[in-house]
Amino acid sequence: MAQPQEAKESSNISSYDSYFKTVQSRKKLPHSLQEVLTSAFAKIPVASFPGVPGGKVLEIPADTSIGDAVKFLSECNILSAPVRNPDAENSSDWKDRYLGIIDYSAIILWVLESAELAAVALSATSATAAGVGAGAVGAIGALALGVTGPAAVAGLTAAAVGAAVAGGAAADKGMGKDAPTAADELGQDFYKTILQDEPFKSTTVRSILKSFRWAPFLPIATDSSMLSVLLLLSKYRMRNVPVIEPGQATMKNYITQSAIVHGLEQCNGRDWFDCIAAKPISVVGLPFMSSNEVISIQSDDLILEAFKKMRDNQIGGVPVVEGTKKQIVGNVSIRDIRHLLLKPELFSNFRKLTVRDFMSTISTSQDIGKAIPAITCNSESTLGNVIETLASKSVHRIYVAGKEGEVVGVVTLRDVISCFIYEPPNHFDDYFGSVVKEMLNQ
């Protein structure tokens, strides 16, 4: 059994190396400039990066019920949080103190796999069951998300699923700054239902964390360098990096890809940034992915196929295209899967629902969590403009369009961060030993 696991771990590291090798080969910036920037980031301590709003990282105890976890994420207006082990509160070792990160997408994935019934109509103040049979949710889980196991928990009511979905949608919109506000906006029945119905009532965050974890939990110390953070968020494909106090295992910050790109955007006006930002993306080697490598979905394909492509390729979104030239007509994100539960007219016809019809319904909807259309640029757009758009629109990707509107590439947050750095030889081995590779291989 060890050999397949070793092969998987080797494959993980190889994929990271392959991506960064491609990045470095396509970048056209002078190597001397890259050396200066990499050296500069290596001298900036993580402690200097701006903290999270409120100055405190919000955590969820591992024994918290799924219902309470959804309520917490919604009330705090966040979509993910570190999970703390209540059995190791006094430990100075972060490996004991923290078990991972739970996010809304993981909870929805668990709901889809374990539910028997799920259909909900969401308005500004209420959710109502629409009475869909057990096979529907099972098909969403299997086809859209690649779930192969049978539903493990019976008796989940449609109202309970509605509570979970509505909670996540509220976090997207920014509702629920506090418990009373959340209750008023979402309807008094939401949290009452989710806290009383099974399996939300008895299932804990700990029990689903390992099976539905999307990325390794790898914290960085406050006295580490920002270069390490940038490498983890780019080459090593992490979406967020927890920051801990050395010797205390206390979480001090929570740095995301989006936060880094926002930080870069605020560097506008500084010579080193303006020098790079003024260059067309083609000059800095973007897009790193060639046009035939871009994973897209035709508008007349089934929407479930779009979600399956995202799941299989571990990506957060795909461009919607039409014709043999693949002209961009829209965008579908992994978060959009919740609309299959939120809107009965979509859910009742999901087996035959095309991407085009799905987008049309969502784009004309006034419901919270409305889908975001595709945002594009061209090869002559400057890196600075791309960064400004990513930051101001709070999106994770921009599609590069050709002269006829065809998709020729995609630029992600990960790609933008990769433009500014390279990895010095043995960087992580020198600073952290083998622990980094062990965690990345999980």
Image (tube, rainbow, N blue to C red):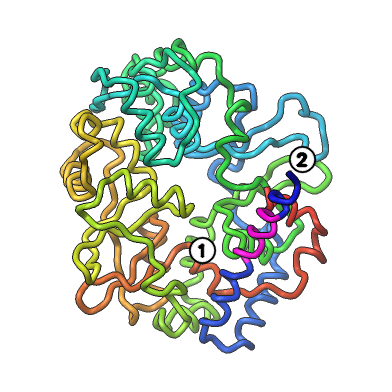
The residue identified by callout 2 is: 95
Residue 299: image location, x then y, percent: 21, 55
Instruction: Give the amino acid type for the residue marked by disc 2 in the picture.
Output: Lys
Residue at figure coordinates x 50%, y 36% from the top left: 106
- The secondary element bearing badge 2 is classed as helix
Residue at figure coordinates x 36%, y 64% from the top left: 398
Looking at the image, residue 373 lies above or below residue 352: below
Magenta segment: does it hold 10?
yes
- The secondary element bearing badge 1 is classed as helix
Left or right of 274, for residue 424: right
| Quarter of the view holding residue 402 | bottom left
Residue 334: image location, x then y, percent: 39, 46
How many numbered marks have been drawn onto this rendered protein structure?
2
Left or right of 306, for residue 227: right
Residue at figure coordinates x 53%, y 44% from the top left: 53
Residue 251: image location, x then y, percent: 69, 42
Instruction: Give the amino acid type for the residue marked by disc 1 in the picture.
Output: Arg
The residue identified by callout 1 is: 414
**Residues packed near mark 1 inside 10 Å, few (<14), some (14 to 19) or many (20 plus):** many
Q: Which of 104 and 270 is in front in this view?
A: 104
Q: Which of 62 and 20 is in front in this view?
A: 20
Tell me the quarter of the image containing the N terminus.
Answer: top right
Magenta segment: does it hold 105?
no
Q: Who comes first in sequence, dot 2 or dot 1?
A: 2
* Magenta residues (range): 7-16
Q: What main secondary structure does the magenta stretch of the protein show? A: helix
Looking at the image, residue 207 lies above or below residue 227: above
Left or right of 260, for residue 112: left
